Every structure is written in structure tokens, then in C-alpha cells.
Image (cartoon, rainbow, N blue to C red):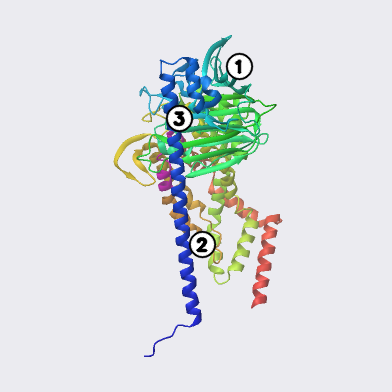
Amino acid sequence: MEERKLDAKTILGFVLIAGIMIWMMYNNISEEKKSIAEDAKKATTEKVEKAKEQTVAAVISDSTQTDSLKVKALQGTLGAFAYSASLPSATENVTEIKNEVLTLKIANKGGYIVDAKVNGFEQFEKGSNKPVEIIKNNNANLNIQLQTKDNRVLNTKDLYFEPTLTKEGENQVVTMRLKAGANQFLEYRYVLKPKEYMMDFSIRTQGLSNVINTSKPLDLDWQLKAFRNEKSVTYENRYTEIVYEYEGGKDNYLSAASKLDETTAEDLTYVAFKQDLFTSILLTETPIKAAQLKSENLVDDEEKDTVYTKNFSAKLPLAFKNGELNYAMNWYYGPADYKILNGYEKNLDEVMPLGWGIFGWINRYVFIPAYDVLSDFFPHGIAIIVFTMLVRLVMSPVTYKSYLSQAKMKVLRPEIAELNEKFAKDPMKKQQETMKLYGKAGVNPMAGCLPAVMQIPVFYALFQFFPSMFDLRQKSFLWADDLSSYDSILELPFHIPFYGSHVSLFPILASVAIFFYMKMTTGDQQMSAPQQEGMPDMGKIMKIMIYVSPIMMLFFFNNYASGLSLYYFISNTITIGIMLVIKNYIVDEKKIHAQIQENKTKDKPQSKFQKKMQEMMEQAEAQKKAKK
């Protein structure tokens, strides 16, 4: 055989492939070098910062030096702010303030809150004696990076503030000042009021225009590594997210499901680090320009990552006015409770995931007020049952209309079967004759679908309602010890993907109820109208859904709030009861059949819908004949 010679195109192809491979290798090497350089730079910076801290700590702790000598020793590291480090307050001490609902500790170092405990609430389960602490063990910090006139970069989180605790009436006031002189300082001011989760907070400077660079805004960095506080880390993490208000009242959020999500918000007026049933919110009267928000999901493996849920950060540029900072703010640490948040009249109810549009409207103005009234008279488990009964009672006319339509379709089924057989070879004619039959009998084939569509807003609103009900937290009912979390009756020695490592009973009961409800209604819902050519067999699909839907319910709700599963169990059980009553005592199929036969003898004009369908089928038939 002759050897095949490489032609020019083949050679060119090899050259291109080689070039691409070289380019890819070069880029990979460049990225590796860049990564190594960034890591080295970060390590160097951390090393320098640590060395600074050690130097400052050594000088501060040296009791042999006078204050004036300490200032001179620290000026090389801290510049003008050596003054603050030389004061007696340059220690690791904290100032504690508390009221009936909050206990806060504010550190001299950094001047920010290092411990925030919500009084009266426990983690995970009742009796655990583990209080709900939004901040503890250095999981949060507040920092302003200062650019000094002598070209230093200082972080307030590493510097010492001088604390002052006073009272204004019944209010407790903590003033933290980072001093560059007796009357030169950066000040954080905290005002805690009795029985309030919301406190006043302000940031201002005085006399620092000759110390720090005021030509551009200072970045206020607020960071929180959110602790897990609820029984199910998976469920809690699903509702742990950043919510923010911007541009004069608009609201938005960062994805709770994404591994990493970030955005820039213009004219930001508040940012909430929401932890499912508790939240931290920073509000500002002066809108923040170009605020940078970031949310990082820390749960990769729900069996192992059980301490933290998200890492939140907000970078808020603070602009100078006449050479000084002066920002009036508020800070909220407490329950993510609709009633409490809505009571502040600052649009904080948007922090709650009540749904958008009509769904949120139903929750705010119907479901929440109704449930609040019921929970005043009944324990929460009973209140959910009574609430479910009321919802089903209100929706019973829709259920009646749906079943009446199904009964009419069932009566017509023999005649439609005859049409299917008579015009088996002519689908278009079969459709036309079926529509004529519907018209003569006074039956609308869409009547059974409309009630189902009408129930969708209610269904979705309830799906958002229960995860937002703080009142259900750690409230027990029957075997469920916490209606805001899953009701485990059995812990499994292994983990099932998408299901978990426990068995919840309420989802099982809800799934069984759904199965019998669908089994009961699917036979009547199978449309006796002819199957259109090229369309799937809806009867077969619905039969499959009888078994698929309960399984989906079982898996999906195993980690959800048991209060929601309880609602669906009671709701479907009541619906089955209502439909049995309608079938056996209200709807008489013989009377329906007689009425349909009577309607067929009358000349009833076609509805607009029927006329439109008739015209469409005639046009389709004409086009089909024209093609032939």
C-alpha cells in the first residue's frame, strides 16, 4: 500500500490544534502564577497585620512605660491613633447592655457588637439550654478601613475604642470612641430601649479632617457568619438569605440556593442578614450609594456542615459631608416575625418570604390576621386544624363546581365514546361533533379546570405562609415537638438522598391522603373528550400521577415544617369528606342526566368560546382539504 501524504489542510489543522493547546497551557500557567501571587500577597498582608497587632499589644501591655512613651512607641505603627491605644481602655474588655428581649456585648477592640443574644429563645429543641445567639465567638465584625494623611491603612476592627455607658431616661447608651486626640475621634453610638429589638445606632467623626483622607467615602464592612439555630440545617438554610431595600422602597434578595451570589445596590436603605426565624437588620436614614452585598453558602454536605449556614457581607460606602461623617442608623437583632417587623413601619415586612403579588396579599391581609385570632384561642396545633377547616369551607363552593363539572362529563361519557368510535378515522370531525354535543347539553369542558386554577393562589400562599410563621417555633402538637421543623418519629442509621436521615410522620399521612384524594377524583377527571392527534394520553398521565404525586410529597416535605404537612393532611382529608358528601347527598347524577337531555332538545345559542372553537376547527379542516 502506498503511504498517504499529509496535505496542506491536515498540516494546518495540526498547527491550529497545537497552537490552541499551547495557548491553553499558557493561560493555565498564568492563572496558577496569578493565584500563587495573590496567595503570597494575602499571606504577606496577614503577616504584616499580625506583626502590627503583636507590636501594639506588646507596647500596651508594657506597664513600665508612661502614657506619653506608649504614644511615641505606637506612632510608628498607628500614627495619630496611637493616642487611643495609650488609653486605659486599650484592653479586651466588653461593655454589656441588656433589656427584656436582648443582651448585647460591645468590645473595646473594634467598638462593635461581639455577642448578641435573643432572650427567651433556645436553639434546636426546647430544654436544650442553648440560647439563640446571633453573634458569638467572633462570627461577626464591623470594620471601617481608614486611609490616613500620612499614608497609613488602618482597620478599626484592630483598634481600641474608649467606651462610655450612660442612661437617657430608661434608655441605655454606649458610646465607643476611637480617638486621635482628646477631641478628635470616630464614634459608634448604641442606644438600647426597653423591650425593643430595634436600637438606635450612629456613626460620626469629629476633628479628623486633618488625620484621615476625606476625599473619598470610607467603606463600612459588616460581616456575619450565620449560626445554625434550628433543628433542620437544610430547611433553615433554604430560608437564610440577604434581603435589602433600595432606590426608595424597592426590595430584593440574594439567592439562598446559590453557592455564591453578589450584587451592587444603589441608594440602599436597609440590608437584612436573615437566618430563617431570626434576623439582623441594619437600616440607614441616609441612602448608601453603590452598596456591595455578598452571600456565600457554607453547607456543602448537610450531614457534616451543621454549625454555619451562610457567610454574609455588606460593604457600605460612607460619604463625607463638610469633612465629617454623620450617619443616623438603626440596628435590629431579633425574631423574623412578621408582626414585630411590620410594626416598625419601615417596610421590614418584606424581609419575610410571604410571596409576591396576590400571594403576598393573601398572606398579609387574610391568612396572618385569621391565624393570629385563632392562635389566641387555641393551641397552635389545634389552631392549624381549625384554620385548615375554615380555608376548606371557604373553598367548598369551588370544590362543588369542580365536582359538578366532573359529574356532567361522566354522564356524557357514553355518548362521547360513541362519537369516538363513529369518527375514529376522522379526528377533526370527531372534535366538531363533540363540541356540538357539549353545546347542546350545556356543558363546558373547561369548567372542571377553572376551579383548580382558582385554588393555585391559595395553595402557593399557604406554601409561603407556614415557613414565615415564627409563632410555630418550638410549639408542640401530638408527636411533633416543633411545628416549625420536621416531626421525626424514627432516626435512620443512613442518609437517603433528597429525603434525609429521619422519617417524618405528618408527610406520610399527607401523602396517603393525597393518594386517596387523587384515586377518588382521577376517574371522574379523565376527559371523555377525544384525544387530539399528536397529543399525549392525559388519562394515562393522570393514572401515573396518582402514584408519583404522593411519593414527591413524601420526599419533598420530609424536612419541611411539620405545621405545613399537618395542614396538607387535614386539608386533603377534609376535601375527601366534602366530595363524598357532594357525591352522595348533593349531586344526583340521574337529575344531571335528565337536565342534559332536556337541554339537548332546546335551541341554545353557542357561547363565544364555542363559536371560536368551531371556527378554528372549520379552518383547520379547510386547510387539511386544501393540502390534499
Residue 536's mark?
A: 2
Residue 552 belongs to magenta span: yes
Vertical side of 495 occupied by 619: above or below: below
Q: Residue at x 60, y 64 (%)?
A: 431
Query: Which residue is at 49% across, 29% downward?
Result: 141
Is any part of residue 160 visible from this angle? no
Q: Is residue 381 magenta?
A: no
Please give the name of the residue rendered at 51% of the width and 24% of the height, measured from the top-left corner: 75
Q: Amino acid at mark 3?
A: Lys
Q: Amino acid at mark 2?
A: Pro
The reply to whether the C-beta atoms of the residues labelled 3 and 1 are less than 8 Å apart is no
Q: Nearer the viewer, mark 1 or mark 2?
A: 1
Residue 308 in sight here: yes
Secondary structure at badge 1 equals loop
Mark carried by residue 52: 3
- The span shown in magenta is 549-564
First-in-chain label (3 vs 1)? 3
Mark before the other along the chain sequence, 3 or 2: 3
Mark 3 or 2: in front is 3
**Could you tell me if the residues under marks 3 and 2 are in contact, i.e. CB atoms within 8 Å?**
no
Seen from the viewer's position, the closer of residues 498 and 380 is: 498
On the image, numbered disc 1 is attached to which residue? 183
Q: Nearer the viewer, residue 437 or 115?
A: 115
Residue at point 45% right, 66% down? 21
Q: Image quarter for residue 60?
A: top left
